[in-house]
Structures are given as structure tokens and as C-alpha cells.
Image: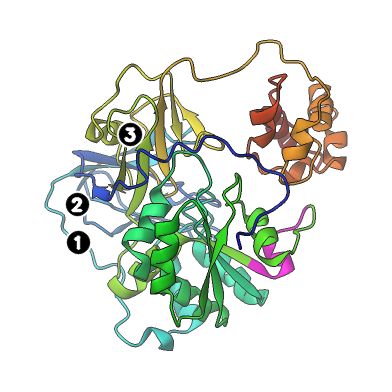
Amino acid sequence: MAFTFKGGIHPDYNKDRTYASPIEELPATEEVIIPLSQHIGVPCSPTVSVGDYVRIGQIIGDSDAGLSCPVHASVSGKVKAIAPHWHPSGVKVQSIVIENDFKDERNDSIVPYEGDLDDLTPSEIIGYARDAGIVGMGGAAFPLHAKLKTAFDKKIEVIIINGAECEPFITADHRAMVEYPRSIVNGAKLIMKCLGKKEAVIAIEDNKPDAIASMTITAEDSGIRICPLKTKYPQGGEKQLIKAITGREVPPGKLPMDIGCAVFNVDTCASLFRAVSKGRPLTKRVCTVSGSAVINPKNLLVRVGTPYYALFEHCGGFSSEPYKIISGGPMMGSAQHSVEIPVIKNTSALLAFCGGEESFDEKPTCLHCGKCISVCPMRLMPNYIYMHAEKEEFAECKKLNVQDCIECGCCSYVCPGRLYLVQAMRMAKGHLPK
């Protein structure tokens, strides 16, 4: 039986060009640009200076704040600059530029655990998560150590490992589940150990039968159950996963942990296992490179700080000048203005599209059809929120629970009047009364 939730849409998934594409490691570039802000929370301060020699895995930025985590060098070489640089978010942030010497010298900043992993304490697992700079790699980039500590304190009842990967084009998590399922399962077991649970669920959409098979075999006798989900966007949203798997609903204004659930991405689990078993901080991640303008779409293992252009060049470049480049998926990703911007910890995909693929209207008009309401996975009324946002009646937007919008884009996708619904939601949330 495949589980699901109310609402959602079935867009063209366009995963076929990279679905069966094995993960390739991208050769290192001559320099990397490592932003000091790659997570939700307080940005790091540099712990190195211009001219310093750094090694792979060395901490180059850190903060004492509880909601923060360190960043590490992804190449060895000399620190060339510490200055503001464009970030995938669209603003400039303080970044460290490292000139690669291609020696790949390593720094043993994390000592791998040499005993039985079952003997690790929750505080030790949380410590490894922090020292390795691990964040939620599904897109949220919430520091893992902070999430584990909060989940431990709240005595979580249900652990869900998110392998849904519902966004069109993206196949990074899919390939991870096929190619290194043992790291994912072992990372999930570390999270179970940390939170004192003997069971967990790995949720995978049923359009990934090879991933379901791979994870089922690997998770045997581990206390981890594989749960096939009905293929529907945004099945991978935390609240949608929880509803589909447990039947529980997260109340407006609340978080999954408030109803006893915690959700972790599959590659986040694998990164935790590598940190504990091999002493590897988060300096690489898998990224899908695809879109109609990309000649040879691929899944790439990329060093954090690698400029976008290197990924596109490795995939054969562009068939024509791209009309739009997106970091992330086409539904929830963000448009990029330059290929000089670096890959960060939560860059799951880079997409490049030809012109003529967007549908918009300079003068959008609501037809009062209600389609946006029927597909909203959060059971909101996007048309009414839009109407109030246009009039800058943000208090009314709050009454309609606009803060619960996950900006999935379902409403905009189905709107025949081409209303800028997601943009209105974002604007309203940014102006909510305190």
C-alpha cells in the first residue's frame, strides 16, 4: 500500500535523464569559494586568515552560537581572500576563497569512533554532528546537532527518514539510496541510538522501485521499516510525510516535534555515519545537474565551494544560452544570476532551462475557480491570502494561517489566471505583525 496526503499535484517529473545516471565525482577546481553561512542560524566567523595554508577537513569558520555549525575546507591550499561573495540566496555573504594546490592534504579535525557504534552516547553522536558541520541536506540546512538535541529533549516518538525526493528533475537522493544504502541505514541507526528509539521509517516514493529494493535489503533486521509513498508532489514535505505515514497533523504554527515526530533526510544520515566512522566532515555532497539546456545531465559528487560553471562544464555545457538557472528544484528552488556562485551544503540540484518554458501573464486575474484551494497540501486558501496581500492587509493573511505556507508552488502551478501566489505568500510572511 502506498501512503499519501490530501492535496498536491502531479507535475511532469522529468527525472528520466538522470534516474539511472551513477554518481560521478567532479574533479576539484582551481579555487573554491566557501560561504560562512550555509545553515539556518548564526553565520560563522573565520578561524583562518588570508595567506594561511589549510587542509581538507580543517575548520575555517565557526561560531559559539547554539544554532550554528562550522564550515570546513574542501581542498588543501592557501587562503586567497576573505570577503563578501554572491550566495545562492541572492545576497552577498562573507566567504573564504581557497586556492587549490591539488595535493589533497587532509586535516584530522574529527577522530573517527573506533569502538562499537552501539556504545556511543547521545551526547557523543550530537558532538560528531556538530564537529562535522552537518546540516539538513534536503534543502532546509538546519544544523543537525541542534535538531538532534531538541528531539532528544522532547522525547520524540516517531523517526522518519525522508527519501521521497518529490521535486521534478532531482535524483540525487535516489542515486544515494541505490549506491550507498548501508551508509544511510547506519546513519539512521545512529539517530535512533541518539533519540533512544529502536524503530524508524524510511519513506520513499513508489516511482523509485530500485531504491525501495536496495533500502529494503539493507535495512533488514535493523528496526527500520521501508514505507513506499504514492508519487505526488510535495510528498517530501515534512508535514505531508508525517500525515501520510502516521496520520498525525501538525497544527498551525507548530512544528513536527510538537506532535512527537522528527524527520531527517537520507543523505544527512549518510553524512552522520561518515563523520562517526571515518572522521569526515561535510565537505562534499551529491548534486543533480539537469534541465533542458544541459547537454549531458548527471548526478555529481561535488566539493562544497565549487562554482556552478564547473558542474555545467562537466555535463557538456549548454545546448543554447540558458533562459534561467535554478539552484534546487523547479518548484521550490531559487533563480540564480551567475554561474560564479558556489555550491553549498544544501545544493541538491542545479538546473538550466531554455527559453519558452515559462507560463506567466503580466496582468494575472483570479477566476475564482478554487483550484489553488483544492491542491494546497497545507489546506490554506491561497486566493484569499493573495487578495489580502495585494491590499497589504497582512493581519488578515495571518488569520488565514499564511505562516503555514511551505511555498511548494502547487497553487501557482494549477492557477489558470497565472496569479503570483507564492510570491504573495512570501511577501505576506515577511510582513506579519510581530
Q: Tell me residue 426's x, y (percent).
A: 68, 34
In the image, the segment drawn in magenta is 253-261
Q: Can you see residue 76? A: yes
- Residue linked to disc 3: 308
Residue 273 lies in the magenta-colored region: no
Q: Tell me residue 403's x, y (percent).
A: 75, 44
Q: Tell me residue 277's x, y (percent).
A: 32, 75
| Neighbour tally class for label 1: few under 14, some 14-19, many 20 plus, Cα within 10 Å | some
Residue 256 lies in the magenta-colored region: yes
| Neighbour tally class for label 3: few under 14, some 14-19, many 20 plus, Cα within 10 Å | some
Q: Earlier in the sequence, mark 2 or mark 1?
A: 2
With 47 as the anchor, is 399 left or right in this view?
right
Q: Amino acid at mark 1?
A: Arg
Q: Is residue 122 above or below residue 344?
A: below
Distance, label 3 to label 1, CA atoms, is 24 Å
Mark 2 in CB contact with mark 1 (< 8 angstroms): yes
- Residue linked to disc 1: 106
